[in-house]
Image (tube, grey):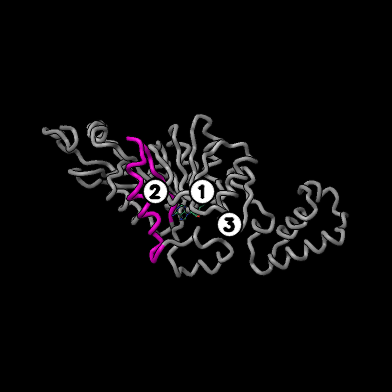
Amino acid sequence: MTTSETRSLLRHVLGISAAALAAHPEQRLNATQLERFNALVTRRRAGEPMAYLTGKREFYSRDFVVSPAVLIPRPETELLVEIGLSHAGKRVLDLGTGSGCVAITLALELKQARVTAVDYSAAALAVARDNGRRLGATVDFRESHWFSAVDGPFDLIVANPPYIAEGDRHLSDLHFEPSSALTSGADGLDAIRQIIAEAPPYLASGGWLFLEHGYDQAVAVRELLKAAHFSSIEQHQDMAGIVRVSGGCLFSNNEYGKSRIGIIRNLSVTTQVGVNLPPLQGEGWGGDGVLRGILPPIPLPTSPLKGEE
Ligand SMILES: C[S@@+](CC[C@H](N)C(=O)[O-])C[C@H]1O[C@@H](n2cnc3c(N)ncnc32)[C@H](O)[C@@H]1O
C-alpha cells in the first residue's frame, strides 16, 4: 500500500480534501473514524481496488460513484469517449454502460445529443442512474441485453463490452470486479461478435459503431467489421501505441453506392469496403493515430450497384 493511498483513505474517512489534510496534518481520528480507517487499510492490503474503498473514480475529469456492481472506469476508455465525440450525431447509444461513465460523459459534452445507455445488470444501472442524477446528465438508461430493449436508429453506437478470454491469466488481478463486465467466451470476443453482427439495423445510414477491445484483438475486430460490411474502418491507438478502439461506418446500399463513388474520386478512403472493391494498398498509421489505407484506382461501375436498381 502506497503513502498516497494511505492519505487518500485518511481523507475519505475524515471527509476532507487533500488541501485540508495538508493544511491540518495534526488532525486526529476519533474512535469510529480509526476503526473505519483500519478496516479500509485491511481491505486494501487484501488487494481490493481503491475505487471500491472510496466509492468513486475520476473519469474524464468528473467523479463517478462506483460499487462492486460495476467495472471501475479505466483511463483508456477515455479514448472511446474522444472518438465518440469526434463522430457523434444526434442519437447516441452506449452498450454495457456499467457506471454510466461513457454515456454520461457523452451526454454532458454533446449538448444536442440524445443519449441512450443499456446494461443487462439492474445493479449496474442503479449506479449509472445515480451518477447521471449527480452529474446532471440526461441519459435514457434501459435494462437491455445489448439491443433487445432499444429501437434506433442511432448515429453513433459505442461499446466497451467485456472482452477478456475466460481463463486469461490477468483475471486473477481483477477478481473484485464483476466477471460479467470482464469475460466473454473462450477468446474474449463473444460480446464483440454479437454487437457487430446485430448493430446494422440499429444504425442510421452513415452511422458509426466504435468498440473498445483487448490489446491483441485489433485484427480480429477489424475482420469482424469488414465481414459485417462496415466501411471507413478506423483503428485508434492508446497512449502506449496499442490499438484499443476500432469502428466503422455503415451505409445503406443506396448511400453506400454514392459514398463509394465519392471515395473513389478522392482516393482517400480509410479502408476496404463492401463487395467488388480491391484490397487496400499502403495501409499505415496517420499522424492522428488512425490506421488508413488507400484504395487502388478502379473503374467506376457501369451497371448499377446492388440496391441501386
Ligand atoms: C467492460 S464493462 C464496461 C462498463 C462501462 N461502459 C465502462 O466503460 O466503464 C461491460 C458492461 O457490459 C455489461 N454487459 C455484459 N453483457 C451484457 C449484455 N449481454 N447486455 C447488456 N450489457 C451487458 C456488463 O454488465 C458491464 O457493465
Callout 1 amino acid: Thr
| Ligand 1 under 8 Å from disc 1 Cβ | yes
Of the numbered discs 2 and 1, the one sitting upstream in the chain is 1
Callout 1 crowding tier (Cα within 10 Å): few <14, some 14–19, many ≥20:
many
**Quarter of the image with the C terminus in it:** top left
First to last magenta residue range: 185-213
Residue at 49% in and 50% down: 119
Query: Could you say where residue 303 lies in the image, as x and y percent from the top left?
Result: 11, 33
| Ligand 1 under 8 Å from disc 2 Cβ | no
Give the alpha-carbon distance from disc 3 to disc 1, as whole Å: 12 Å
Of the numbered discs 2 and 3, the one sitting upstream in the chain is 3
| Ligand 1 under 8 Å from disc 3 Cβ | no
Residue to which mark 3 is pinned: 69
Callout 2 amino acid: Ser
Residue to which mark 1 is pinned: 97
Q: Helix or strand or loop: what does disc 3 sit on? A: loop
Query: Dots 2 and 3: beta carbons under 8 Å?
Result: no
Callout 3 amino acid: Ala
Query: Could you say where residue 208 lies in the image, as x and y percent from the top left?
Result: 38, 40
Residue at 47% in and 44% down: 94
Query: Could you say where residue 79 lies in the image, as x and y percent from the top left?
Result: 49, 46
Residue at 35% in and 36% down: 204
What is the number of callouts on the image? 3
Q: Helix or strand or loop: what does disc 1 sit on? A: loop
Residue to which mark 2 is pinned: 246
